[in-house]
Amino acid sequence: MANLGFLFSRPNCDLNRSKTLINIAHSLLRLSGVGALSLGLLLSGCGNDKEAVSSKAKEGYKELDDLYIVDCLLPNQVRRLGNTSYLPPRKAIKTTTSDCRIRGGEYVDYNRADYRSALNVWLPQAQAGDAEAQNYVGEIFEKGLGQTPDFTSAVSWYKKAADQGYARAQINLGYMYEKGQGVPRDMTIALNYYRQASGIKNDTLVLNSDAQKEIAANKQQLADALQKAQTQANVLQKQVAGLQTKLTKQEALAAKSPQAAQELASVRQELEAMKSLYEKAQGEKTSISGELQSVELAYRKFSDQPLLTNETLATGGARTFKDINFGRYYALIIGNQDYTFLEHLRSPISDARKLKGILESKYGFSTLLIENGSEKQILNTINDFYNQIGEGDNLLIFYAGHGQLSTGENSKKERGYWLPIDAKANTLSTWINNAVISDHLDRLKARSILVIADSCYAGFLGSEKSPLLFGVSSSQITEAGIKASLNRRARLVISSGGLAPVLDGTNSNHSVFANALIETLEHNNETLRDSNLFSALSVNVRKRAGAADLVQMPEMKPVREAGHAGGTFYFVPKI
């Protein structure tokens, strides 16, 4: 066990604490945040053209109001078909306010958008059968956007898009079945939709340990419910038999006594009522038995296969394995440490610099590093990547800095925030809402994006934890498995402590989480997928935190709102 030395905190999980309390807490807990980038820099494919990057640092720099993602309705353009002119329907897109304005589109300001304004943009296109628009309509109903979410309508629209093979809708629909929102909870159906979205064939599927535990727990609940229903049915069956015997006797007495004849009618009525209860209990038992058989089928299908294991793959400088092209790799790294209005932190810049070096030297990433970044720098940089990163590329976003939690303006749902270097306590207008980051991740064309977040409340960037969604994988890292996952978008977040505070820098000048991340990437010499990275660093973090008698539980989640469609992020060493 490594010696942790003194532990420090990132003390602004509660920005209302006095400086005295902050200094006391400084020896216990750490706050950080999630990834962003640098100032709108232009990346080179090989990552070595530093002068070109520097010279374009301010090019295309936009104000904050230009950088928010909105539902944009583009204007009609007159088109010609032979000698005939016609006006096609207007097209809905998600883009920045600046891009929408330049293209002459209509939109509602980000902070004023609601259920009606968003629905007005996407509903006509959805009703015309466009799968992407149908999925967005489903997301509008699911989110609520200022009103109570309508899960039933969300499921209906997700189903329309999923039936057309739209992977993002299949993910969303599977999630609704997993959580029982708008439909009865059914993990088997959820698993089937996740499998459809993943593109992996049945015979190569396995479940990870969390997913196996989830199905096993559900199986046990159903087994207990079935036993209870069986016991109730047995009791009712005995009561029916007893009443049947009583009825026979009463029928014999009724022929001899008028009073007995009156009691006979009462016994018959009681018997009919008891038979009705018995039939209802039998129906409930049959329903539970069918559901249990379905879950047992899924459980038997996957639980006897090995858990996720690695297969060593040869790698080369071209970022390929056999005929697999993994695409280009970019990293956007930010370390916010020396805050203007908030308490300074200890290790974010050191963490960011070390990670930058590893990603460049060992994994061939083109990297951008921003130290002590403002809100404008972060959002401008992410926005610039829209035209720089292609559909086959990969983007890693790392952020270390303060984080915070608050209730959003148009929703009662709690939101996580990144705190830029100029953030002020209790001033949401100076914080970066995770929803804004998620919108940009959705807009970017990159095939896979992995956010690694070392901050308080970093887990709020992702969706609610879904054991099944991450449980569908190929049993080994094989050529077929990689090809299947490379055909799907990946939008994932690994957070240092989920929805809670996390430990800060130790005597090694790195946070507990960053230290585990750095060690895992340094010691790895084979193709590494996101889930294996998470497993390795999670064990390391829990062990180090436990040595200090503290608890820190990293989490890995899909960012469904950003369009996660079951894909995977791979790290491929250069040698």
Image (tube, rainbow, N blue to C red):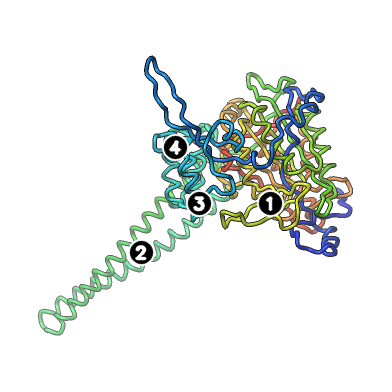
Residue ID for mark 1: 429
Residue ID for mark 2: 233
Mark 1 vs 2, N-terminal side? 2
For the residue pair 201 and 384, the one nearer the viewer reads as 384
Vertical position of residue 431 compared to residue 395: above or below = below
Could you tell me how far apart the alpha carbons at marks 2 and 4 are, in whole angstroms?
42 Å
Mark 3 vs 1, N-terminal side? 3
Could you tell me how far apart the alpha carbons at marks 2 and 3 are, in whole angstroms?
42 Å
Residue ID for mark 3: 144
Please tell me how crowded label 4 is: few (under 14), some (14-19), or many (20+) other residues with Cα within 10 Å.
many
Vertical position of residue 248 compared to residue 335: above or below = below
Q: Nearer the viewer, mark 3 or mark 1?
A: 1
Residue type highlighted by circle 1: Ser
Residue ID for mark 4: 161
Residue type highlighted by circle 3: Gly
For the residue pair 241 and 457, the one nearer the viewer reads as 457
Q: Nearer the viewer, mark 1 or mark 4?
A: 1
**Residue at screen point 66% across, 28% down:** 389
Could you tell me how far apart the alpha carbons at marks 3 and 1 are, in whole angstroms?
22 Å
Q: Secondary structure at mark 3?
A: loop
Mark 2 vs 4, N-terminal side? 4
